[in-house]
Structures are given as structure tokens and as C-alpha cells.
Image (cartoon, rainbow, N blue to C red):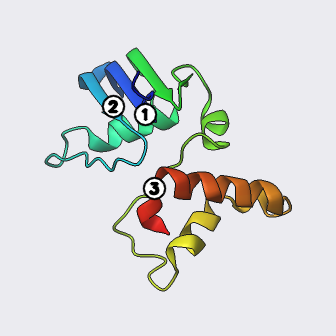
Amino acid sequence: MSEQPTLEINALSAGYGRFDVVRDVALSVGKGEAVALLGPNGAGKTTVLRAIMGLVKQRRGLIRIGGTDVSALPTHRIARGLAAIAPEGRRLFLDQSVEDNLLLGALHLRHDKARTQTLLASVYDLFPVLK
């Protein structure tokens, strides 16, 4: 039996106001895989990412992260250990190491070093190339 995907999106439709920006998006990302979401400006790349994080209400579809259905979860619950968005292009942290950047995502756990190390180890387990 194959491993369950780290991220699974099925039949996702989401948008702003009355308009769908993306329709019927399907995506599956396995453990250790890197996937690029490509397209021209306005194609809906950011809308898909925002829907994953609960920042844009999805109209239809299913989003699972690590097997957990996050379709109806509020953003703060998704960000608390399931997923995060780190927009590229602003080049804010050029001099930081990969680990320093990862630790920024665990800043809310700064007083729980054991949990931080556990989460860091799980990221390295999912993406060994980051070590």
C-alpha cells in the first residue's frame, strides 16, 4: 500500500467575492516531494496557497494536510503545526541558513525547545535535502 500524501487537494474551487479564481484543482504531494505551482500572473497560484491556509474560503473541494482535512479549519489552526506559507521574492532573509528560516516558522514555540526540535526533525524527515 502506498503512503498517504503529505498534501492532497481534490476538486478545489476558490475565489474572491462572487468569482471563482480556480476551479477543480487537484494536486497530490508525497513525502519528500517538491512541487512547483506554475502559471502566469492571475492564474490562481496564490489563491490555491491561500485556500490551503484558510485565508480564502473554498467554495468546493477537499484539502488534506498529512491526512487531516483542513477544509473547514480556521487559519490559526492550520498554521499551528500543519502548514505555513513563506512567499518568495521579498528576499528578506538572504543571510540566514535554511535552519534559521525553518526556526522562524516555529517562533511561537520559542519557549518549548523540545517541541521545536521535534518539528524540525519532522521537516528534515520530509525534506532530507534541507539538511
The N terminus lies in which quarter of the figure? Answer: top left
- Going from N to C along the chain, the mark reached first, 3 or 1, is 1
The structure residue drawn at horizontal position 40% and vertical position 75%, both measured from the top left corner, is: 91
Whether residue 53 is visible, yes or no, is yes
> Dot 3 lies on which element?
loop
User: Which is more toward the observer, 57 or 102?
Assistant: 102
> Dot 2 lies on which element?
strand
- Going from N to C along the chain, the mark reached first, 2 or 1, is 1
The picture quadrant where one finds residue 63 is top left
Q: Which residue appears farthest toward the right when viewing the image?
A: 111
Q: Are marks 2 and 1 in contact (CB under 8 Å)?
A: yes
The Cα atoms of the two marked residues, 2 and 3, are separated by: 16 Å
Residue carrying label 2: 28
Give amino acid for label 1: Leu
Answer above or below: position of 121 versus 25.
below
Q: Residues within 10 Å of mark 1 (few under 14, many from 20)?
A: some
Answer above or below: position of 7 versus 62.
below
The Cα atoms of the two marked residues, 3 and 1, are separated by: 14 Å
Specify the label residue 7 is tagged with: 1
Q: Which residue appears farthest toward the top when viewing the image?
A: 60
